[in-house]
Amino acid sequence: MINLILFGPPGSGKGTQAVKLVEKYNLLHISTGDLFRYEMGNNTPLGLEAKSYIEKGQLVPDSVTIGMLKNKVDTNPDVSGYIFDGFPRTINQAEALDSLLAEKKLVIDKLLSLKVEDDEIVKRILHRGKTSGRADDNDASIIQNRINVYKQETSPVFDYYAKTGKSVLVEGMGDIDEIFERLNAEVHAI
């Protein structure tokens, strides 16, 4: 079983590469955005709880997000592994994810962080904004703010997994297939 965290700033190509990794390694792609949409769209107890925080403009507590992750893992026990996309975003979430996996006698094998320059990220997200329908994908200053929040709040997760030798920087610039081959080399090294 392979358990990966696909990591990097918004617009670094995580979603694109996750699809390719899922296909190649038969992994279950767990995206927190997808989990939230599913749970809230189906009015599950966790979805309703998350919705109550979001409607007040508050962050959804980690306990709710971890509950959603646990549900997803529990309902998909026969996969070859998991690829976590968009989670964990904080050290607390990383610790909670490690605890959740430990209950199943699993660990994160590797955190693969896509390294992309800020100006390229802005360019990519503005391009995505032409079709995404997301207002925050069409404003360069909002995009730069998202990058800054990532650097301040999320990038410490890289250091958390680096302490155990699990974090790897992968060049995220270039052709999609070239980037995928770089990721494959890291997966094969597990």
Image (spheres, rainbow, N blue to C red):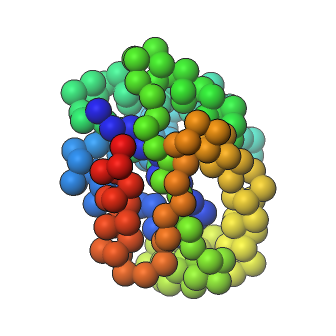
- Locate the C terminus by quadrant: top left
Q: Using residue 66 as the reference point, say whether residue 108 is left or right of it.
A: left
Percent position of residue 158, x then y = 63, 49
- Looking at the image, which residue is at 55% across and 42% down? 165
Compare residues 40 and 116 and report the one nearer the observer: 116
Percent position of residue 58, x then y = 74, 41
Q: Is residue 94 above or below residue 9?
A: above
Q: Quadrant of residue 20?
A: bottom left
Compare residues 153 and 32 and report the one nearer the observer: 153
Total labels drawn: 0
Percent position of residue 140, x then y = 69, 81
Residue 25 appears anywhere in the view: yes
Q: Using residue 54 as the reference point, say whether residue 42 is left or right of it.
A: left
- Looking at the image, which residue is at 75% across and 50% down? 153
- Looking at the image, which residue is at 35% across and 49% down? 189
Residue 64 appears anywhere in the view: no
